Protein backbone atom coordinates (compact mmCIF):
# COMPACT_ATOMS: atom_id res chain seq x y z
CA UNK A 1 0.00 0.00 0.00
CA UNK A 2 1.64 3.18 -1.20
CA UNK A 3 -0.90 5.73 -0.11
CA UNK A 4 -0.15 8.58 2.23
CA UNK A 5 -1.90 9.67 5.42
CA UNK A 6 -1.00 13.33 5.99
CA UNK A 7 -0.67 15.09 9.32
CA UNK A 8 -1.26 18.68 8.31
CA UNK A 9 -0.06 21.05 10.98
CA UNK A 10 3.35 19.43 11.43
CA UNK A 11 3.58 18.42 7.78
CA UNK A 12 4.28 14.86 8.83
CA UNK A 13 3.22 12.03 6.57
CA UNK A 14 3.88 8.33 6.50
CA UNK A 15 3.92 5.85 3.66
CA UNK A 16 2.02 2.60 3.96
CA UNK A 17 1.81 1.04 7.39
CA UNK A 18 5.36 1.02 8.76
CA UNK A 19 5.20 0.71 12.55
CA UNK A 20 7.71 3.51 13.23
CA UNK A 21 5.81 5.96 11.04
CA UNK A 22 2.54 4.95 12.66
CA UNK A 23 3.96 5.58 16.13
CA UNK A 24 5.31 8.99 15.06
CA UNK A 25 1.85 9.89 13.79
CA UNK A 26 0.16 8.72 17.00
CA UNK A 27 2.61 10.64 19.20
CA UNK A 28 1.69 13.79 17.27
CA UNK A 29 -1.96 12.82 17.07
CA UNK A 30 -3.38 15.85 18.84
CA UNK A 31 -1.04 18.56 17.59
CA UNK A 32 -1.14 17.24 14.03
CA UNK A 33 -4.96 17.21 13.99
CA UNK A 34 -4.91 13.76 12.39
CA UNK A 35 -7.66 12.76 14.78
CA UNK A 36 -9.85 15.64 13.71
CA UNK A 37 -9.36 14.83 10.02
CA UNK A 38 -10.31 11.25 10.83
CA UNK A 39 -13.41 12.20 12.80
CA UNK A 40 -14.67 14.40 9.98
CA UNK A 41 -14.61 11.55 7.49
CA UNK A 42 -18.15 10.74 6.42
CA UNK A 43 -17.34 7.31 4.99
CA UNK A 44 -18.49 4.12 6.65
CA UNK A 45 -14.90 2.89 6.56
CA UNK A 46 -13.92 5.74 8.88
CA UNK A 47 -16.80 4.89 11.22
CA UNK A 48 -15.73 1.24 11.19
CA UNK A 49 -12.15 2.22 12.02
CA UNK A 50 -13.40 4.29 14.96
CA UNK A 51 -15.50 1.39 16.25
CA UNK A 52 -12.61 -1.08 15.88
CA UNK A 53 -10.21 1.17 17.80
CA UNK A 54 -12.77 1.75 20.54
CA UNK A 55 -13.63 -1.94 20.66
CA UNK A 56 -9.95 -2.76 21.07
CA UNK A 57 -10.11 -1.28 24.58
CA UNK A 58 -12.74 -3.84 25.64
CA UNK A 59 -10.77 -6.67 24.03
CA UNK A 60 -7.75 -5.67 26.12
CA UNK A 61 -9.84 -5.39 29.30
CA UNK A 62 -11.26 -8.85 28.66
CA UNK A 63 -7.76 -10.28 28.23
CA UNK A 64 -6.52 -8.51 31.37
CA UNK A 65 -9.26 -10.00 33.54
CA UNK A 66 -9.90 -13.41 31.98
CA UNK A 67 -6.59 -14.36 30.36
CA UNK A 68 -3.07 -14.77 31.78
CA UNK A 69 -0.47 -11.95 31.54
CA UNK A 70 0.92 -13.21 28.21
CA UNK A 71 -2.56 -13.07 26.71
CA UNK A 72 -2.92 -9.47 27.91
CA UNK A 73 0.36 -8.45 26.29
CA UNK A 74 -0.51 -10.09 22.99
CA UNK A 75 -4.02 -8.66 22.97
CA UNK A 76 -2.67 -5.16 23.63
CA UNK A 77 -0.44 -5.25 20.59
CA UNK A 78 -2.80 -7.36 18.50
CA UNK A 79 -6.10 -5.54 19.04
CA UNK A 80 -4.69 -2.04 19.00
CA UNK A 81 -2.39 -2.72 16.06
CA UNK A 82 -5.51 -3.77 14.15
CA UNK A 83 -7.16 -0.48 14.92
CA UNK A 84 -4.07 1.62 14.30
CA UNK A 85 -3.36 0.10 10.90
CA UNK A 86 -6.99 0.29 9.84
CA UNK A 87 -6.99 3.90 11.03
CA UNK A 88 -4.44 4.58 8.30
CA UNK A 89 -6.55 2.82 5.67
CA UNK A 90 -9.68 4.78 6.51
CA UNK A 91 -7.97 8.12 7.12
CA UNK A 92 -6.05 8.05 3.85
CA UNK A 93 -6.84 11.15 1.83
CA UNK A 94 -6.23 9.46 -1.50
CA UNK A 95 -9.06 7.03 -0.97
CA UNK A 96 -9.83 3.73 0.66
CA UNK A 97 -7.93 0.85 -0.97
CA UNK A 98 -10.38 -2.02 -0.61
CA UNK A 99 -8.10 -4.71 -2.05
CA UNK A 100 -5.23 -3.82 0.27
CA UNK A 101 -7.64 -3.64 3.21
CA UNK A 102 -9.01 -7.14 2.46
CA UNK A 103 -5.50 -8.58 2.19
CA UNK A 104 -4.60 -6.92 5.46
CA UNK A 105 -7.73 -8.25 7.17
CA UNK A 106 -7.11 -11.82 6.02
CA UNK A 107 -3.49 -11.64 7.19
CA UNK A 108 -4.47 -10.27 10.60
CA UNK A 109 -7.21 -12.86 11.05
CA UNK A 110 -4.77 -15.65 10.17
CA UNK A 111 -2.29 -14.36 12.76
CA UNK A 112 -4.98 -14.10 15.43
CA UNK A 113 -6.28 -17.61 14.76
CA UNK A 114 -2.76 -19.05 14.72
CA UNK A 115 -2.11 -17.47 18.13
CA UNK A 116 -5.38 -18.68 19.61
CA UNK A 117 -5.64 -22.17 18.05
CA UNK A 118 -2.05 -23.29 17.62
CA UNK A 119 -0.48 -21.54 20.60
CA UNK A 120 -3.58 -21.65 22.83
CA UNK A 121 -3.11 -18.06 23.97
CA UNK A 122 -5.99 -15.69 24.65
CA UNK A 123 -8.31 -17.92 22.65
CA UNK A 124 -11.72 -16.29 23.19
CA UNK A 125 -10.51 -12.72 22.65
CA UNK A 126 -8.58 -13.48 19.46
CA UNK A 127 -11.28 -15.75 18.02
CA UNK A 128 -13.88 -13.02 18.34
CA UNK A 129 -11.51 -10.39 16.93
CA UNK A 130 -10.63 -12.63 13.98
CA UNK A 131 -14.32 -13.15 13.14
CA UNK A 132 -14.92 -9.41 13.34
CA UNK A 133 -12.00 -8.61 11.06
CA UNK A 134 -13.07 -11.18 8.46
CA UNK A 135 -16.72 -10.07 8.44
CA UNK A 136 -15.50 -6.55 7.68
CA UNK A 137 -14.32 -7.85 4.29
CA UNK A 138 -17.98 -8.09 3.24
CA UNK A 139 -18.56 -4.42 3.91
CA UNK A 140 -18.13 -1.73 6.56
CA UNK A 141 -21.65 -2.27 7.95
CA UNK A 142 -20.78 -5.91 8.65
CA UNK A 143 -17.60 -4.75 10.39
CA UNK A 144 -19.44 -2.18 12.52
CA UNK A 145 -22.26 -4.51 13.58
CA UNK A 146 -19.97 -7.49 14.21
CA UNK A 147 -17.55 -5.35 16.25
CA UNK A 148 -20.42 -4.09 18.43
CA UNK A 149 -21.72 -7.64 18.93
CA UNK A 150 -18.20 -8.85 19.69
CA UNK A 151 -17.68 -6.12 22.28
CA UNK A 152 -20.99 -6.91 23.98
CA UNK A 153 -20.15 -10.62 24.00
CA UNK A 154 -16.73 -10.09 25.56
CA UNK A 155 -18.09 -7.51 28.00
CA UNK A 156 -20.71 -9.99 29.17
CA UNK A 157 -18.06 -12.72 29.42
CA UNK A 158 -15.87 -10.38 31.49
CA UNK A 159 -18.55 -9.39 34.00
CA UNK A 160 -19.83 -12.98 34.20
CA UNK A 161 -16.31 -14.05 35.13
CA UNK A 162 -16.12 -11.30 37.78
CA UNK A 163 -19.48 -12.37 39.22
CA UNK A 164 -17.81 -15.59 40.36
CA UNK A 165 -14.99 -13.68 42.08
CA UNK A 166 -15.50 -12.41 45.62
CA UNK A 167 -16.51 -8.73 45.44
CA UNK A 168 -15.63 -8.82 41.75
CA UNK A 169 -18.76 -7.01 40.53
CA UNK A 170 -18.45 -4.46 43.35
CA UNK A 171 -14.94 -3.44 42.30
CA UNK A 172 -15.80 -3.67 38.60
CA UNK A 173 -18.64 -1.17 38.94
CA UNK A 174 -16.32 1.26 40.72
CA UNK A 175 -13.41 0.78 38.30
CA UNK A 176 -15.57 0.93 35.18
CA UNK A 177 -17.40 4.04 36.39
CA UNK A 178 -14.36 6.02 37.48
CA UNK A 179 -11.89 4.57 35.00
CA UNK A 180 -13.81 3.93 31.79
CA UNK A 181 -16.54 6.59 31.88
CA UNK A 182 -14.49 9.47 33.31
CA UNK A 183 -11.28 8.28 31.64
CA UNK A 184 -12.91 8.12 28.21
CA UNK A 185 -14.30 11.61 28.77
CA UNK A 186 -10.83 13.00 29.47
CA UNK A 187 -9.49 11.40 26.29
CA UNK A 188 -12.30 12.85 24.18
CA UNK A 189 -11.89 16.34 25.64
CA UNK A 190 -8.14 16.11 25.02
CA UNK A 191 -8.65 15.17 21.37
CA UNK A 192 -11.63 17.37 20.47
CA UNK A 193 -11.46 20.59 22.48
CA UNK A 194 -9.06 22.59 20.31
CA UNK A 195 -11.01 21.88 17.13
CA UNK A 196 -14.41 22.93 18.50
CA UNK A 197 -15.97 26.38 18.34
CA UNK A 198 -17.22 28.27 21.41
CA UNK A 199 -20.64 26.61 21.58
CA UNK A 200 -19.24 23.13 21.02
CA UNK A 201 -16.63 23.65 23.75
CA UNK A 202 -19.30 24.89 26.16
CA UNK A 203 -21.44 21.80 25.72
CA UNK A 204 -18.42 19.48 25.62
CA UNK A 205 -17.29 20.68 29.05
CA UNK A 206 -20.85 20.44 30.34
CA UNK A 207 -20.93 16.81 29.26
CA UNK A 208 -17.51 16.30 30.83
CA UNK A 209 -18.98 17.48 34.13
CA UNK A 210 -21.92 15.15 33.58
CA UNK A 211 -19.47 12.26 33.11
CA UNK A 212 -18.17 12.86 36.63
CA UNK A 213 -21.71 12.44 37.93
CA UNK A 214 -22.14 9.18 36.00
CA UNK A 215 -18.77 7.83 37.15
CA UNK A 216 -19.44 8.55 40.81
CA UNK A 217 -23.01 7.30 40.35
CA UNK A 218 -21.53 3.90 39.48
CA UNK A 219 -19.35 4.04 42.59
CA UNK A 220 -22.35 5.01 44.74
CA UNK A 221 -24.43 2.25 43.12
CA UNK A 222 -21.82 -0.39 43.93
CA UNK A 223 -21.64 0.72 47.57
CA UNK A 224 -25.41 0.91 47.96
CA UNK A 225 -26.04 -2.53 46.47
CA UNK A 226 -23.31 -4.04 48.62
CA UNK A 227 -24.92 -2.56 51.73
CA UNK A 228 -28.23 -4.05 50.62
CA UNK A 229 -26.63 -7.47 49.93
CA UNK A 230 -27.92 -7.31 46.38
CA UNK A 231 -24.78 -8.09 44.35
CA UNK A 232 -25.15 -11.87 44.20
CA UNK A 233 -25.30 -13.49 40.75
CA UNK A 234 -28.82 -13.56 39.40
CA UNK A 235 -30.10 -10.53 41.33
CA UNK A 236 -31.29 -7.26 39.81
CA UNK A 237 -28.54 -5.42 41.67
CA UNK A 238 -25.86 -7.61 40.12
CA UNK A 239 -27.25 -6.92 36.63
CA UNK A 240 -27.27 -3.17 37.29
CA UNK A 241 -23.69 -3.19 38.55
CA UNK A 242 -22.61 -5.14 35.46
CA UNK A 243 -24.26 -3.01 32.80
CA UNK A 244 -24.62 0.50 34.23
CA UNK A 245 -21.01 1.50 33.31
CA UNK A 246 -21.44 0.19 29.76
CA UNK A 247 -24.71 2.08 29.27
CA UNK A 248 -23.19 5.29 30.65
CA UNK A 249 -20.14 4.90 28.42
CA UNK A 250 -22.33 4.53 25.33
CA UNK A 251 -24.40 7.53 26.44
CA UNK A 252 -21.44 9.87 26.84
CA UNK A 253 -19.79 8.75 23.58
CA UNK A 254 -22.97 9.27 21.55
CA UNK A 255 -23.56 12.65 23.21
CA UNK A 256 -20.11 13.89 22.23
CA UNK A 257 -20.63 12.60 18.72
CA UNK A 258 -23.70 14.84 18.47
CA UNK A 259 -21.67 17.86 19.59
CA UNK A 260 -19.12 17.10 16.90
CA UNK A 261 -21.92 16.91 14.33
CA UNK A 262 -23.53 20.12 15.71
CA UNK A 263 -26.81 18.31 16.18
CA UNK A 264 -29.16 18.78 19.11
CA UNK A 265 -31.30 15.89 20.37
CA UNK A 266 -34.70 16.79 21.84
CA UNK A 267 -33.46 15.30 25.13
CA UNK A 268 -31.02 18.25 25.51
CA UNK A 269 -33.26 21.29 24.92
CA UNK A 270 -30.56 23.79 25.96
CA UNK A 271 -28.69 22.81 22.78
CA UNK A 272 -31.49 23.84 20.39
CA UNK A 273 -33.76 26.19 22.30
CA UNK A 274 -31.83 29.25 21.07
CA UNK A 275 -30.99 27.79 17.65
CA UNK A 276 -27.44 26.94 18.76
CA UNK A 277 -27.50 23.54 17.00
CA UNK A 278 -29.96 22.07 14.53
CA UNK A 279 -32.81 20.09 16.04
CA UNK A 280 -31.99 16.38 15.58
CA UNK A 281 -29.37 14.97 13.26
CA UNK A 282 -29.81 14.36 9.54
CA UNK A 283 -29.13 10.67 10.16
CA UNK A 284 -32.01 8.67 11.64
CA UNK A 285 -29.50 6.06 12.81
CA UNK A 286 -27.76 8.70 14.96
CA UNK A 287 -31.08 10.00 16.32
CA UNK A 288 -32.57 6.61 17.17
CA UNK A 289 -29.39 5.10 18.66
CA UNK A 290 -28.85 8.12 20.90
CA UNK A 291 -32.49 8.21 21.98
CA UNK A 292 -32.55 4.53 22.95
CA UNK A 293 -29.29 4.76 24.92
CA UNK A 294 -30.51 7.96 26.60
CA UNK A 295 -33.73 6.24 27.66
CA UNK A 296 -31.70 3.36 29.12
CA UNK A 297 -29.21 5.64 30.89
CA UNK A 298 -31.82 7.91 32.45
CA UNK A 299 -35.33 6.52 32.81
CA UNK A 300 -34.46 2.82 32.54
CA UNK A 301 -31.58 2.73 35.03
CA UNK A 302 -33.29 5.16 37.37
CA UNK A 303 -36.41 3.03 37.70
CA UNK A 304 -34.47 -0.22 38.04
CA UNK A 305 -32.11 1.20 40.68
CA UNK A 306 -35.01 2.43 42.80
CA UNK A 307 -36.79 -0.94 42.45
CA UNK A 308 -33.63 -2.82 43.46
CA UNK A 309 -33.03 -0.59 46.50
CA UNK A 310 -36.67 -0.70 47.63
CA UNK A 311 -36.56 -4.51 47.48
CA UNK A 312 -33.25 -4.94 49.31
CA UNK A 313 -33.36 -1.96 51.71
CA UNK A 314 -36.96 -0.71 51.92
CA UNK A 315 -38.68 2.66 51.89
CA UNK A 316 -39.03 2.55 55.69
CA UNK A 317 -35.32 3.38 55.94
CA UNK A 318 -36.14 6.88 54.67
CA UNK A 319 -38.05 7.70 57.89
CA UNK A 320 -36.47 9.87 60.55
CA UNK A 321 -36.93 6.96 62.93
CA UNK A 322 -34.67 4.73 60.82
CA UNK A 323 -32.10 2.91 62.95
CA UNK A 324 -29.46 2.95 60.19
CA UNK A 325 -27.97 6.29 59.13
CA UNK A 326 -26.10 4.56 56.31
CA UNK A 327 -29.26 3.16 54.70
CA UNK A 328 -31.12 6.42 55.40
CA UNK A 329 -28.52 8.30 53.34
CA UNK A 330 -28.49 5.71 50.55
CA UNK A 331 -32.24 5.79 50.04
CA UNK A 332 -32.58 9.58 50.26
CA UNK A 333 -29.63 10.16 47.94
CA UNK A 334 -30.84 7.90 45.15
CA UNK A 335 -34.45 9.08 45.42
CA UNK A 336 -33.27 12.71 45.19
CA UNK A 337 -31.16 12.02 42.08
CA UNK A 338 -33.94 9.94 40.51
CA UNK A 339 -36.84 12.32 41.03
CA UNK A 340 -34.73 15.16 39.62
CA UNK A 341 -34.38 13.30 36.32
CA UNK A 342 -38.14 12.87 36.05
CA UNK A 343 -38.63 16.54 36.88
CA UNK A 344 -36.39 17.45 33.92
CA UNK A 345 -38.70 15.42 31.67
CA UNK A 346 -41.72 17.18 33.19
CA UNK A 347 -40.29 20.71 32.95
CA UNK A 348 -37.65 20.78 30.20
CA UNK A 349 -37.68 18.03 27.59
CA UNK A 350 -40.97 16.16 27.68
CA UNK A 351 -41.01 12.66 26.18
CA UNK A 352 -39.44 13.18 22.77
CA UNK A 353 -39.75 10.56 20.03
CA UNK A 354 -36.75 8.52 18.91
CA UNK A 355 -36.59 9.93 15.38
CA UNK A 356 -38.38 11.79 12.62
CA UNK A 357 -39.88 8.76 10.88
CA UNK A 358 -43.33 7.75 12.13
CA UNK A 359 -42.20 4.21 12.92
CA UNK A 360 -39.77 5.63 15.50
CA UNK A 361 -42.53 7.64 17.19
CA UNK A 362 -44.93 4.81 17.98
CA UNK A 363 -43.35 4.04 21.35
CA UNK A 364 -43.01 5.93 23.54
CA UNK A 365 -46.00 7.92 22.26
CA UNK A 366 -44.20 11.18 23.07
CA UNK A 367 -45.55 14.58 24.08
CA UNK A 368 -45.73 18.01 22.45
CA UNK A 369 -42.86 19.19 24.62
CA UNK A 370 -42.71 19.47 28.43
CA UNK A 371 -45.90 19.11 30.45
CA UNK A 372 -45.33 22.39 32.33
CA UNK A 373 -42.59 24.05 30.31
CA UNK A 374 -39.79 26.07 31.89
CA UNK A 375 -36.74 27.62 30.30
CA UNK A 376 -34.39 24.59 30.15
CA UNK A 377 -31.43 26.83 30.99
CA UNK A 378 -33.10 27.63 34.33
CA UNK A 379 -33.66 23.93 35.00
CA UNK A 380 -29.98 22.97 34.74
CA UNK A 381 -28.73 24.30 38.10
CA UNK A 382 -31.51 22.76 40.23
CA UNK A 383 -30.85 19.46 38.47
CA UNK A 384 -27.11 19.70 39.14
CA UNK A 385 -27.88 20.49 42.81
CA UNK A 386 -29.93 17.30 43.11
CA UNK A 387 -27.37 15.12 41.38
CA UNK A 388 -24.41 16.49 43.33
CA UNK A 389 -25.92 16.22 46.78
CA UNK A 390 -27.86 13.05 45.98
CA UNK A 391 -24.73 11.16 44.91
CA UNK A 392 -22.68 12.73 47.72
CA UNK A 393 -25.21 11.58 50.32
CA UNK A 394 -25.10 8.03 48.93
CA UNK A 395 -21.29 7.97 48.97
CA UNK A 396 -21.23 9.07 52.61
CA UNK A 397 -23.87 6.50 53.49
CA UNK A 398 -22.20 3.61 51.63
CA UNK A 399 -18.55 4.26 52.44
CA UNK A 400 -18.33 6.52 55.51
CA UNK A 401 -21.22 5.97 57.90
CA UNK A 402 -20.90 2.18 57.56
CA UNK A 403 -17.42 2.35 59.12
CA UNK A 404 -17.85 5.26 61.54
CA UNK A 405 -20.68 5.23 64.05
CA UNK A 406 -22.05 8.65 65.05
CA UNK A 407 -23.67 9.43 68.35
CA UNK A 408 -27.41 10.12 68.54
CA UNK A 409 -27.05 13.91 68.36
CA UNK A 410 -24.84 13.87 65.24
CA UNK A 411 -27.03 11.23 63.60
CA UNK A 412 -30.09 13.42 64.12
CA UNK A 413 -28.18 16.45 62.76
CA UNK A 414 -27.19 14.61 59.57
CA UNK A 415 -30.79 13.53 58.99
CA UNK A 416 -32.03 17.10 59.47
CA UNK A 417 -29.42 18.40 57.01
CA UNK A 418 -30.65 15.91 54.41
CA UNK A 419 -34.26 17.01 54.99
CA UNK A 420 -33.05 20.59 54.57
CA UNK A 421 -31.53 19.69 51.20
CA UNK A 422 -34.92 18.31 50.16
CA UNK A 423 -36.56 21.60 51.14
CA UNK A 424 -34.06 23.59 49.05
CA UNK A 425 -34.46 21.23 46.10
CA UNK A 426 -38.25 21.35 46.00
CA UNK A 427 -38.42 25.09 46.73
CA UNK A 428 -35.97 25.88 43.93
CA UNK A 429 -38.12 24.01 41.43
CA UNK A 430 -41.27 25.79 42.59
CA UNK A 431 -39.51 29.14 42.07
CA UNK A 432 -38.44 28.10 38.56
CA UNK A 433 -42.02 27.15 37.63
CA UNK A 434 -43.40 30.44 38.98
CA UNK A 435 -40.71 32.45 37.23
CA UNK A 436 -41.13 30.67 33.87
CA UNK A 437 -44.90 30.25 33.88
CA UNK A 438 -46.17 30.49 30.31
CA UNK A 439 -42.69 29.98 28.86
CA UNK A 440 -42.47 29.56 25.09
CA UNK A 441 -39.17 28.40 23.52
CA UNK A 442 -37.25 31.07 21.63
CA UNK A 443 -36.82 28.53 18.83
CA UNK A 444 -39.42 29.36 16.18
CA UNK A 445 -41.26 27.29 15.21
CA UNK A 446 -41.24 24.93 18.14
CA UNK A 447 -39.23 21.88 16.99
CA UNK A 448 -41.89 19.52 18.27
CA UNK A 449 -44.23 21.02 15.66
CA UNK A 450 -41.90 19.58 13.03
CA UNK A 451 -43.23 16.10 13.70
CA UNK A 452 -46.79 17.32 13.10
CA UNK A 453 -45.65 18.96 9.86
CA UNK A 454 -43.95 15.75 8.73
CA UNK A 455 -47.12 13.74 9.44
CA UNK A 456 -49.26 16.28 7.57
CA UNK A 457 -46.95 16.21 4.54
CA UNK A 458 -47.03 12.40 4.54
CA UNK A 459 -50.84 12.45 4.75
CA UNK A 460 -51.12 14.90 1.84
CA UNK A 461 -48.69 12.82 -0.18
CA UNK A 462 -50.81 9.69 0.36
CA UNK A 463 -53.98 11.57 -0.57
CA UNK A 464 -52.38 12.98 -3.74
CA UNK A 465 -51.18 9.53 -4.68
CA UNK A 466 -54.65 8.11 -4.10
CA UNK A 467 -56.25 10.85 -6.22
CA UNK A 468 -53.64 10.24 -8.92
CA UNK A 469 -54.61 6.56 -9.04
CA UNK A 470 -58.31 7.35 -9.19
CA UNK A 471 -58.07 9.78 -12.14
CA UNK A 472 -56.75 7.19 -14.66
CA UNK A 473 -59.52 4.80 -13.59
CA UNK A 474 -62.17 7.48 -14.23
CA UNK A 475 -60.66 8.26 -17.64
CA UNK A 476 -60.73 4.54 -18.53
CA UNK A 477 -64.42 4.30 -17.61
CA UNK A 478 -65.25 7.33 -19.75
CA UNK A 479 -63.39 5.96 -22.76
CA UNK A 480 -65.24 2.63 -22.44
CA UNK A 481 -68.57 4.43 -22.40
Image (cartoon, grey):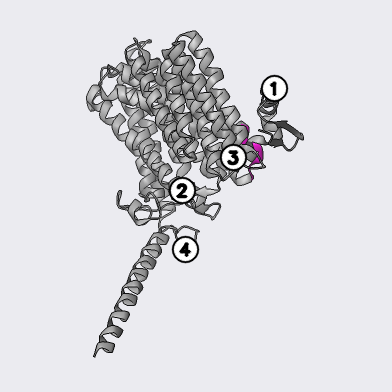
- The vertical placement of 451 against 89, above or below, is below
Looking at the image, residue 190 sits to the left or right of residue 12; the answer is left
Q: CA distance from mark 4 to mark 3?
A: 32 Å
Where residue 481 is drawn, which disc sits there? none
Residue matched to label 3: 39
Magenta highlight range:
191-197
Q: CA distance from mark 3 to mark 1?
A: 23 Å
Residue 152, percent across and down?
39, 28
Residue matched to label 2: 265
Q: Do residues under tags 1 and 2 come within 8 Å of each other at their CB atoms? A: no
| Residue 237 placement: quadrant | top left
Whether 20 is among the magenta residues is: no
- The vertical placement of 77 against 29, above or below, is above
Which quadrant would the N terminus be assigned to in this image? top right
Q: Do residues under tags 2 and 4 come within 8 Å of each other at their CB atoms? A: no
Which quadrant would the C terminus be assigned to in this image? bottom left
Residue matched to label 1: 20
Q: Earlier in the sequence, mark 2 or mark 3?
A: 3
Q: Do residues under tags 2 and 3 come within 8 Å of each other at their CB atoms? A: no
From the viewer's perspective, is the residue at label 1 or at label 4 nearer?
A: 1
Residue situated in front as seen by the camera: 47 or 457: 47
Q: CA distance from mark 1 to mark 4?
A: 54 Å
Residue 51, percent across and down?
50, 33
Looking at the image, residue 182 sits to the left or right of residue 239; the answer is right
Amino acid sequence: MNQVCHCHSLNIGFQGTKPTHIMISLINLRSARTWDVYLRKKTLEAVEAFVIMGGGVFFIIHAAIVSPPLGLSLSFFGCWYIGIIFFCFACNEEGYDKKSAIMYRVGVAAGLLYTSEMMGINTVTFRVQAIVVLLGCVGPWFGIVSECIGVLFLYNDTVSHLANVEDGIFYWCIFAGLGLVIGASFVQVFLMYDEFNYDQRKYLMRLHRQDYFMGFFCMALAGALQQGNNLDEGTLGCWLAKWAPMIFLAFTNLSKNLIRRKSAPPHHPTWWVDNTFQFQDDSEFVNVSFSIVTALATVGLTILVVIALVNCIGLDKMLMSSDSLSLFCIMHGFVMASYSGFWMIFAASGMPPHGRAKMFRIFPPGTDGPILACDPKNCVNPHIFDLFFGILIVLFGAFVFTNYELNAALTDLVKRVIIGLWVISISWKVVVHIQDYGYVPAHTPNPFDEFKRIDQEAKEKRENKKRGEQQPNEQTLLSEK
